[in-house]
Amino acid sequence: MLIRKLFSFEGAHVVRNCTSQRCARSIHGHSYKVEIFLECHQLDRGQMVYDFGLLKGDVRELIDAFDHTLVFWQEDDADYIEQCKQHSLRWIGLPVSPSAEQLSRVFFGLIDTLLQQTEMHNGEGNVVLQSVIVHETATGYAQCFREDAGNPQMGLIVPSAITYSHQIINEASGGALTRLSALPSLSREAT
Ligand SMILES: [Zn+2]
């Protein structure tokens, strides 16, 4: 059985090397929607797959870190990155390009790690993250599965390699972001 939870955030980016010049050369924003799918074949004592309340605080903090944020690829032009940092209080540097595809991989890896750090005490079965969908527009999305998250051809995503501005760190009070930032690798590599 699958259960799904929806989150949203407003974010800005440029997707370098994109075929569309508008996308590749202009800073622009999206109203992102992020869908998280959890899979389990057993119900807990509440006859639910999983009480999302257990995970909600951490995931909300993670998604909120991306809200009203300029997200750039750390391999982008050094001047552009410098200007992003100078003119935006909230910015995130990713080791991969901030396309919807890569954002779905980033969220998969980080949420998967948070899920494994969550203690369950209500007879939950083996609850696993099945996929993450990132909607960039009303008509298009990318869906990341476990094999995509760990696919080296798509680029390695290490939590500690993701950089967050001071403002984001200061506003993320729950501790999930700080815990993730300290991790040299994802807690479970894709199989
Ligand atoms: Zn875009």
Image (cartoon, grey):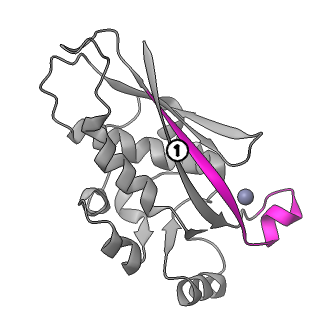
Q: Residue furthest left?
A: 121
Residue 132, image x, y percentages? 51, 36
Point 86% across, 56% down: residue: 19
Q: Is residue 20 above or below residue 92?
A: above
* Side of 69 where 171 appears, left or right: left
Q: How many marks?
A: 1
Query: Is 131 in front, or is 62?
Result: 62
Residue 137, image x, y percentages? 73, 47
* Residue underneath mark 1: 105
Name the element at disc 1.
Answer: helix
Is residue 73 magenta-colored? no
Point 51% across, 69% down: residue: 93
Q: Is residue 20 above or below residue 133?
A: below
Point 26% across, 62% down: residue: 182
* Side of 2 where 178 appears, left or right: left
Q: Is residue 187 visible?
A: no
**Dot 1 crowding, Cα within 10 Å, few <14, some 14–19, many 20+:** many
Point 29% across, 44% down: residue: 114
Q: Amino acid at mark 1?
A: Arg
The magenta region covers 17-37
Image quadrant in which you'd find residue 122 = top left
Quadrant of the picture in which ligand 1 is shown: bottom right
Residue 175, image x, y percentages? 23, 60
Say which quadrant the C terminus sits in. top left
Residue 155, image x, y percentages? 55, 51
* Side of 175 where 161 appears, left or right: right
Image quadrant in which you'd find residue 39 = top left
Is the residue marked 1 within 8 Å of ligand 1, measured from its CB? no
Q: Is residue 38 visible?
A: yes
